[in-house]
Image: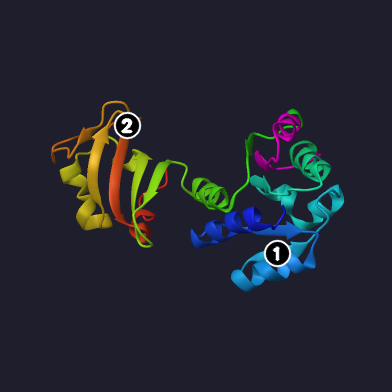
Amino acid sequence: MGLGRFGSAVCKELMQNGAEVLAVDRSSKAIEELRQLEPSIEARIVDCTDEEALREAGILDMETVVVAISEPIEASITATLIAKDSAGSKVRRVIARATSDLHEKMLKRVGADRVVFPSRMQGERLGVELVRPNLMERLELDKHHSIEEIKVPGRFVGRSLRDLNLRKNFRVNVLAAGPAKELMVNPPASHVLQDGHVLVVMGLTDDLQELPKT
């Protein structure tokens, strides 16, 4: 909800990662600009403070809602409250954008599960987090290569690096592995990955996105 720079950045990142996205804004101009960036996106003109309009648009059927409205402040608070408290709402999590400490406090009081402060980069990062919950940190080396710190995916737990052969199967290199506070740099092939531990991997950003997401 809300398609300024922040909201559009979230949508773009989600779309690039194959997520199902429903974008709404009361501005037809904002909707058109987003469609020019992402022609395949489902985007609708909706008053985000109107419960019935949001219900009809399908927002209350979504599992996660991002309230990216910047102003007026009361609009983002109302939208958050509708998403969390409307009868029959299937929304399990609301992530809302705040513009001040007071705004953050009010959003949390009406049910926001998480509050973020705006920037385009944060919008992109939030989009990544929503589709890759095990991603802890990302360092972009250039336009195409990154280093990522991820929680060990469930599929990898109990398996050795030799068995997983991440270089062959995912085209990424393992830089470190182990408990977050005691990472082993350049771990041996015999190293067995454990639940709750961390992997630091490097490769093409597109290849890194192919790693298991949970």
Tell me, for residue 138, which label it has, or none. Answer: none
Residue under numbered circle 2: 197
Label 2 neighbourhood size at 10 Å, few (<14), some (14-19), many (20+)?
some
Q: Is residue 162 left or right of residue 42?
A: left
Q: Can you say whether 107 is above or below 52 in the image?
A: above
Q: Quadrant of residue 27?
A: bottom right
Dot 2 or dot 1: first in sequence order is 1
**Dot 1: element:** strand
Tell me, for residue 43, which label it has, or none. Answer: 1
* Membership of 100 in magenta stretch: yes
**Dot 2: element:** loop
Label 1 neighbourhood size at 10 Å, few (<14), some (14-19), many (20+)?
many
Q: Position of residue 197 (x, y in %)?
A: 32, 31
Give the amino acid type for the residue marked by disc 2 in the picture: His
Q: Quadrant of residue 149?
A: top left
Q: Position of residue 54 (x, y in %)?
A: 80, 52
Span colored in magenta: 86-108
Q: Is residue 46 visible?
A: yes
Q: Is residue 50 left or right of residue 165?
A: right
Q: Can you say whether 20 is above or below 194 in the image?
A: below
Residue depicted at x 69% and y 58%? 3
